Image (spheres, rainbow, N blue to C red):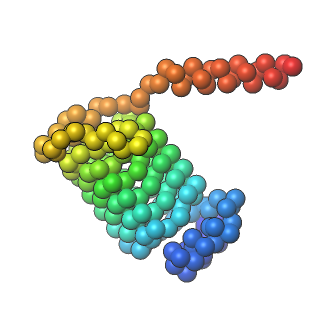
Amino acid sequence: MAHQKYFSYLKNGVTLWNHWRENHPHEIPDLREINLEGANLEGANFKDTNLAGANLRWANLKRVDFTNANLSHAECMMADCSMACFVGANLSNADFRGAILVHAKLQEAKLVQTNLSQTNVTGANFYDTARDGWNIEGSLCEYVFWDWSKEHRIPQHGYFRPGEFEKRYKNSHTPHHPLRAMLHLVTLMFNRVSLVE
């Protein structure tokens, strides 16, 4: 399989893996459906990596960089993702049941049909996330952030009551940004005019 090449690099440890990533910035690792159950991957660079369907159960994913990575359908149950960066990542249909996402960066992540039940998301940042059909049943949360720079803590003072985070946000969906949609339309029109010229 395609990922065997990358798995061989990863087996040498996070330090050497990150060094290899630094030296090959334009190569996108293919680790689809890889089995990394229980692995210690703290601080690993998985930016832009394809981890669709990967088994990351019970793995140590503290401070891992998953920026723009594909973790759709990944199994991340009971994984420790404290302070991990999922900015722009695709987590659709991923299973994080019982995982720790304390202070995780989830800005602009795709959380469509993602299972976050029984997950600790205290201090996580959910700015501009797509959340259609997400499951946060029984999730643990004292406070969260919904702005990019984490300047506005919710709740502003104190903590959520048990079950309050779930009650507030279980039915929240993908945010609608009229300005962003307008800018996208203008860009398309500009590109079309450029092609005509």
- Residue 94, given in percent of the width and then of the height, sits at 41, 50
- Residue 131, given in percent of the width and then of the height, sits at 38, 37
Quadrant in the picture for residue 150: top left
Quadrant of image for the N terminus: bottom right
Res 145 visible: yes
Quadrant in the picture for residue 143: top left
Residue at position x 31%, y 39% from top? 152
- Residue 19, given in percent of the width and then of the height, sits at 61, 73
- Residue 139, given in percent of the width and then of the height, sits at 23, 48
Left-right relation of 113 to 118: right
Left-right relation of 9 to 153: right
Q: Determine whether 188 is above or below 77 in the image.
A: above
Residue at position x 37%, y 31% from top? 173
**The one of 91 and 141 positioned closer to us in this rendering:** 141
Quadrant of image for the C terminus: top right
Residue at position x 30%, y 62% from top? 78
Residue at the outermost left position? 161
**The one of 51 and 146 positioned closer to us in this rendering:** 146
